[in-house]
Amino acid sequence: MNQSRYLWLSMPLIFTFIVSCSDNSTEQKSTSPVTDKTEVAKSEKKAIKPQQYSAAEFFKTITVFGSSINHDATAVLVTNDQNGVFNAYRYPLDGSAPTQLTQSNTDTIFGISWFPEDERILYTADQGGNELNHLFVRELDGTIKDLTEGEKLKARFASWLTDKSGFFVLTNERDSKGFDVYRYSITDYKRQLVFQNNDNWSIGEVSPNGRWLTLNQNISNSDSNIFLVDLHSADKKPSLITEHQGNVSHQSYSFTPDSRQLIYATNEYGEFNQAWSINLEDRKKSVFYQANWDVAFVYFSDDGKYRVAGINQDGQTRIDIAEVASGNSIALPSLPQGDLRGVNFSADSKKMVFYINSDTSPSNLFSFDIGAPSAKRLTQTLNPDMDEQQLVASEVKRFKSFDGLEIPGILYKPKTASVEQKVPALVWVHGGPGGQSRKGYRAAIQHLVNQGYAIFAVNNRGSSGYGKTFFHLDDKKHGEDDLQDIVYGKKYLQTLSWVDGDKIGIIGGSYGGYMTMAAMAFTDEFKVGIDIFGVTNWQRTLKNIPPWWEAFKKSLYDELGDPATDADRHYAISPLFHADKIKNPVLIVQGANDPRVLQVESDEMVAAMKKNHVPVEYVLFPDEGHGFRKKANRITASDAYVAFLKKHL
């Protein structure tokens, strides 16, 4: 599945694996406009009055992620925002107090990995959300060294060498449109260029022994290939390993720890991604892992003893951790209800760390000695002044759209809602295009629900996770069929006896922000809209994509249209050029350093609405990019949502 649809416009991703150990969702199928009888029965129960919490109280919650275990299996490298800005921390596996390793008060820091044999760490940081990440090392004495010095470059860590002599880094310093691959020495950080990316390939994986490199070629938004490069050869000529007929998407997952096989995704044999393996010596292929949903990822413990696979199943990812030799799944201890995230192992595979996250509880870190009767909880991330029972678990719901297509969504019902006490509602639209709303804790959503607003996170056609046919149904139909799915999501809400059908708004970030403004300009369905760094002028946006997305540009144009040939359509679907049709109030929230959706998009929309004397409010963060990473800014944004809704909805 083409990654450009996730990464270009979607909300910033926290790079942890989102997987589940238990199913706490309930699926009810409903069709609009028939009233959902199940909901009527539920609403007859007397609604309770929960305690209301402020945005500051919700964001007093600590966001934690990262699961690299150090060389002697005594600590895990974690990133958290306890002090308002993300920094790297050392969390001892025995449960003792963590130690803060970096001290940034401005730029967000994401911890990447411990060094293989000592307490040095690698981390990445950009400047004010501009996404020009550099890679840094924190030395044993606490000093910091930028390993990727230079201006206007973007870099990221790739992988370690099994022999512990070095590591690989990708950087676009030579050409902003493509990433070259460098091998760094683990001792003095001297580097060697091992692959010069003259053709702007999308770089995939480097094998643990350092010999093999995968390159991803995007032919179209539904057709892609994997090429293999022997980095030990003289010419380093890419070799095609995914020969196929027709439109088939491929993506490399991981090499096996012995570097003899590549595990990759393909949707050649059905609607969903399967994991296949290819032997790198004889190039024989075979099914490695499959399910009735997308295989989301496959990876291994460093010593190859365990395999971890995840399935994207209806907005949650099911995890399967198995011993490679026997194929048997490992036994996990009794755990709190929720999804597993960030599963990782010590070098000897005797210890495991992971997170558990649910709709009502943010991620908490656990350590587990494999085979032990219990796991140790290392964090308490929910604000201790809050009662988890006051928060709301979501349910997966389905409805039929204008053409009979079944559309999934994630529904949050406020505890105050009942037939006698109907509540206002918001349709929540995810980023992308091609993203997916998923179950799991989100402070902004829980804050809105706690304030008495129902939320229905609709996964309109074009969303990932529901098969390749569903995924491509919105190609070059944005602002049309996908927008109708959102409208019919609103109609579904109106069938619920506990929703005030006259008070329904729309909210979304990035591509969801575009959908919000499209809904306000091209329909009269929604009373209010909240646009969070959304595209308003496709002509400008598609001409100004960041240069490092060059490898995905063809796929992006197949999805949305080429600005050279589809300018008329882009004009037709851009809310900015139809601002005179917007009649209802809008709140717009934007980061000044956003490289994907430029600030001017929001500036011009605000000006156009003011010119037309339509109520519009604007919140601009000078120190944020495509998404709000600083806790103070997230609080300000959430307070603005609630204040705006109380005023206008």
Image (spheres, rainbow, N blue to C red):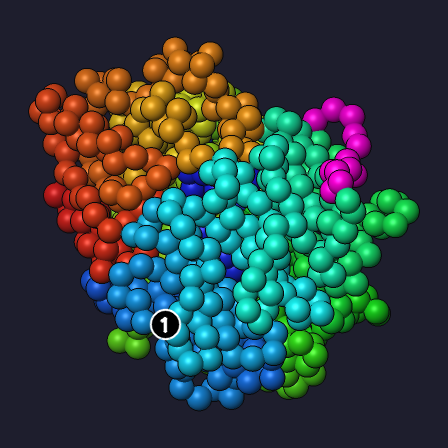
**Mark 1 surroundings: few (<14), some (14-19) or many (≥20) residues within 10 A:** many
Image quadrant in which you'd find residue 571: top left
Amino acid carrying mark 1 in the image: Thr
Query: Can you say which quadrant of the picture contains the N terminus?
Result: top right
Question: Which residue lies most toward the right here?
Answer: 282
Q: Residue at x 15, y 49 (%)?
A: 643
Q: Residue at x 42, y 21 (%)?
A: 480
Residue 595 drawn above or below residue 19: above
Identify the secondary structure beneath mark 1.
Answer: loop
Instruction: Tell me where residue 523 appears, x and y as whole percent.
Output: 30, 22
Residue 525 drawn above or below residue 596: above
Q: Residue at x 22, y 60 (%)?
A: 632
Instruction: Tell me where residue 573 appears, x and y as whole percent.
Output: 36, 19
Q: Is residue 48 left or right of residue 646?
A: right
Image quadrant in which you'd find residue 36: top left
Residue carrying label 1: 102
Query: Can you say which quadrant of the picture contains the C terminus?
Result: top left
Magenta span of residues: 235-247
Instruction: Tell me where residue 495 appears, x and y as whole percent.
Output: 37, 37
Whether the magenta-drawn stretch holds residue 239 is answered as: yes
Tag count: 1
Of residues 326 and 348, the one nearer the viewer is: 348
Whether the magenta-drawn stretch holds residue 270 is answered as: no
Instruction: Tell me where residue 218 appears, x and y as whole percent.
Output: 62, 32
Residue 170 drawn above or below residue 582: below
Q: Main secondary structure of the magenta part?
A: loop
Residue 640 in view here? yes
Q: Residue at x 74, y 24 (%)?
A: 246
Image quadrant in which you'd find residue 341: bottom right
Residue 487 in view here? no
Q: Is residue 183 left or right of residue 585?
A: right
